[in-house]
Amino acid sequence: MTLRGFQVSEKLIEKWVSEYLAESVWEVRENANVNRSYTALMSYVVEKAMRALIPKYFPEKAVKLHLDGWIHIHKLPHSLFIPYCAGWSTERILRMGLKTPSISAKPAKHADVLVDHLVNFLYCIAQEWTGAQALSAIDLYLAPFAEHDRLDYKRVKQCVQRFIYDLNFTGRLGMQTPFTNVMLTCGAIEEYMDLPAIVGGEVVGTLGDYYHRVPEVVKAFCEVYLEGDATGRPFTFPIPTVPVTPDFWKFPEMDMIWLATARRGSFYFLNGYSIDVAQLFSMCCRLVINTAKVVHKNSYREKLEEIEGELFKMKHIPRGVWAIPDATGSIGVVTINLARIAMEAVKRGDEKYVFDILQDLFRVARECLMTMRRRYEKSLESGLMPMTRMYLGHFMNHYNTIGFVALPEFSSILLQRPRLWYIEDPRGAKEVCKLYRSVLEFANKICEEFESEDGVLYNIELVPAESAAYRLARLDYEKYPEFRSYIPVEAPFGSEGEKVPFYSSLITPSYSTWDLRLQLEVESEIQPLFTGGVMKHIFLGTKLEVEQVRRFVENICKTTRIVYFSLTPVMSVCQKCGWWDIGIYARCPRCGNEMIDVYSRIVGYYRPVKLWNVGRKAEFKSRRHLREEDVEKVVLM
């Protein structure tokens, strides 16, 4: 396959329209957040046509390696023009109000207006980025409005309900919702308490002065997530993260967090015992403050040099994939196919080849990411990102991100054990950790060299790889038939059809039959080595009680170095009567209807499995959903 000399014709357009309408190719379901619609059809056709520009703007070698399956350049073709993900300063929105190219609103004076501003900001800004958009400390910033408006709990909940519902309506191109994340501090980050509370654009004290209203806000979030929408479906966005620090355990509404997690899998947990959450988030707040006045080109470089030293202090703090601090994020992501590297190393009988080719691929990724950065700076200057220019103004705090995918398959191939993840062996786990550590330490060293030479930030991310994991596995399955026993295959969920290959986007794969405690040991050792995003999903097939969830989360946070994790119960929802429960059901036990939607996290967000791409459906079918006794072993650890 090649893109060189590719020209769009009427015949090609007709072909793409037919593909979409018939869903005859897997790419139609590449993104589970996209709903079938006219705008999704238009988006599919336009994206296909825009791919003709990729060789013109991106380095030739990177494009070739992407097509061959060595690497994956994410978010094509949109990543030709706009960057990937960002965290935004809630404080800045409160001070500036909502300024858009068409209309401007003064800073919010009331809670309902604040909600509208935040929602509309996220919808607008999502048009200028290809990936996730995040807001931090929503609970703390909403609390002063609850106090000044004298809201009772019912009205606080109404505001939160409005916020969550509005962020789940399909207002983006392709009939999709903006990919949004929020962090609820729950009093766990003391450094936030001294930051200014702002109402109507004016400082009205500190956030700590209004902390007594925070439990109401968090309780409202939990209740809305628990209830789901009018038909019982879980909310997809915003994805909420809670930082678990020693101060977190004093929070009065903890039980609601555990309940929402047990029933809906709502929350992610950022482990403040493993990383310095306060430094990560409070330093980013200071970066926002320090760069708040950098809007004119003349002062840009001078002001950024003042904060460069402060910025680089936080560069190696690991974080969760969806826990994006203010004023930072990722320019773009180029992911390396580790399984391919392992196959070539084994074929050559030379493990050192792993590091030789890894270094070469890192250089290719670097060239591609620096090309992206230069292009996005032009997009910013030329007016393609008007709101980003107003609310951020630069990409100095954003990382060039190099991703990894297929780590479990990489280790099984190099160790030449096709059944590695199905036969529990503590010695094998140690060998896996040794392999992972050698690769990640090597990768981080290269990134440090790149940072020194390029003057920009680099990090390593365990990428979600919603579509990349299938695309790369599919290519390798055809190219390397001698290694097929190492590539997981499964028939897609809901189908008795042909089995399809896929790669894992976790450190310990969802299909592993290892005891959860052994998986967590590996995660604990390896997660802190990822300087970008990382996560561990613990997939559940059964209900847990509130106390079980509390003890489970507490034990992981206090006894391991795991950075970021979720408890993800699989859910079934009846389309007819709205009944829902944890587990995989073929028929509604209430009304007998067989129109059941099964929901789980595809790579981090809940969507019905029927909307997933074929590779992810196969991965879902292979998942080992844990039982109550598996969780209890960790509770008693």
Image (cartoon, rainbow, N blue to C red):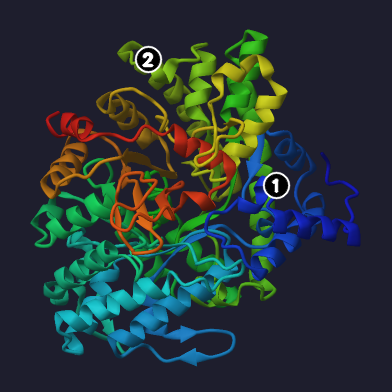
Residue on which the image places disc 2: 423
Residue 83 horizontal side relative to residue 570, left or right: right
**Count of numbered marks:** 2
Which residue is at the far front? 592
Q: In front of the other: label 1 or label 2?
A: 1
Near mark 1 (Cα within 10 A), the count class, few <14, some 14-19 or many ≥20, is few
The first of marks 1 and 2 along the sequence is: 1
Q: Where's residue 439, x and y in %?
A: 49, 25
**Residue 514 visible in image:** yes
Residue 440 horizontal side relative to residue 28, left or right: left
Q: Where's residue 373, x and y in %?
A: 63, 56
Taking the spot 64% from the left edge, 41% from the top edge, the residue there is 72
Near mark 2 (Cα within 10 A), the count class, few <14, some 14-19 or many ≥20, is some
**Residue 9 visible in image:** no
Q: Give the Cα distance between marks 1 and 2.
A: 35 Å
Q: Secondary structure at mark 2?
A: loop
Taking the spot 53% from the left edge, 26% from the top edge, the residue there is 488
- Which of 133/496 is in front? 496
Query: Given the image, on which type of amino acid does mark 2 rest?
Result: Ile
Q: Secondary structure at mark 1?
A: loop
Q: Where's residue 328, x and y in %?
A: 45, 59
Examine the rendered structure and indicate whether residue 252 appears above or below residue 529. Answer: below
Taking the spot 42% from the left edge, 71% from the top edge, the residue there is 167
Residue 25, numbered circle: 1
Screen quadrant of the N terminus:
top right
Examine the rendered structure and indicate whether residue 409 appears above or below residue 32. Answer: above
Quadrant in the rendering for residue 331: bottom right
Examine the rendered structure and indicate whether residue 206 appears above or below residue 104. Answer: above
Taking the spot 19% from the left edge, 44% from the top edge, the residue there is 544
